[in-house]
Amino acid sequence: MKRWAGAAALGLLAACGSTVKDDPNSQASLDKLYVEAKEELSTGAYERAIKLLERVEGRAAGTVMAQQAMLEMAWAQHRSGEKAQALSTLDRFIKLHPSSAGLDYALYLKGLVNFNEDLGFFGRFAGQDISERDQQASRDALQAFRELVERFPQSRYSEDSRIRIDFITNMLARHEVHVARYYYQRGAYVAAASRAQTAVTDYQYAPATEEALHLLAQSYEQLKLTALRDDALRVLRKSYPSSQYLPGNEPPARSWWQFWRS
């Protein structure tokens, strides 16, 4: 009887130990779930990783682990092509954790999602100038990268963000010039002047500003606004003294395929 009682007691203790160890609400269980999610991420199983990270975030709410799970979830969504979901997760992170140590990475990833979305589209249409498509994603990326650089100038992501800012700025300036040229060639001189002015004002240090000033002067010439035309030419001459767009010089020749695309 004593032997049976002892065995029963040992069995009860073992059962209790097993219950604690396998408790789905325990920290050990949560850690195991997180490790599993990381393993799925490392193998590229993003959909499975996202589901696991959602569970981690829910169970670890209010902790640093939950923040990390959100960031890794956004990365997985981005890698699996779920742009809208990735941006939604990042916006939620930024709103819920404005003082998080991972905020700079959240801003960087937000910029990257929009930046890569544009490049991905460009890659599917070989030969099309990326500046010729709608640029809202680029503007959103620029805003995120600028906020990162301004708020976290010493962040490990700031240097790369500055490079991307320059690239996007030049691309957006080219886009405005492309649209201004389109309007000018079709006789919509007011619209052409407006888009050229946007390029000059918003992206004054971009290379495309030279042609923007040229289009601005041409548009004002067509509209008989000689004073404004002269102002545009004065700025063009001062900023680009050797410009081929100045009166007396022919603008750079365009290739046959550029005329075809116009």
Image (cartoon, rainbow, N blue to C red):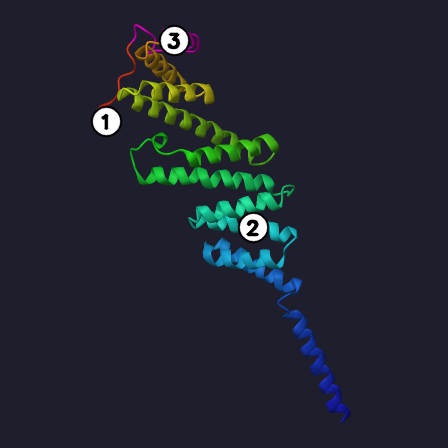
Drawn side of residue 199 relative to residue 249, left or right: right
Q: Residues within 10 Å of mark 3 (few under 14, many from 20)?
A: many
Which range is magenta?
A: 226-249
Q: Which mark is residue 70?
A: 2
Q: Say if the magenta span includes residue 235.
A: yes
Question: Could you tell me residue 130's position as x and y percent?
Answer: 36, 32
Closer to us: 166 or 136? 136
Amino acid beneath label 3: Leu
Name the image quarter holding residue 8: bottom right
Q: Residues within 10 Å of mark 1 (few under 14, many from 20)?
A: few
Amino acid beneath label 1: Trp
The residue at the point 64 percent across, 50 percent down is: 64
Closer to us: 40 or 30? 30
Name the image quarter holding residue 36: bottom right
User: First in sequence: mark 1 or mark 3?
Assistant: 3
Q: Which mark is residue 98?
A: none
Q: Can residue 63 be seen at all in this image of the molecule?
A: yes
Residue that badge 1 annotates: 257
Q: Is residue 220 above or below residue 101?
A: above
Question: Could you tell me residue 240's position as x and y percent?
Answer: 41, 11
Residue that badge 3 annotates: 233
Can you tell which of label 2 and label 3 is closer to the viewer? Answer: 3
Q: CA distance from mark 2 to mark 3?
A: 52 Å
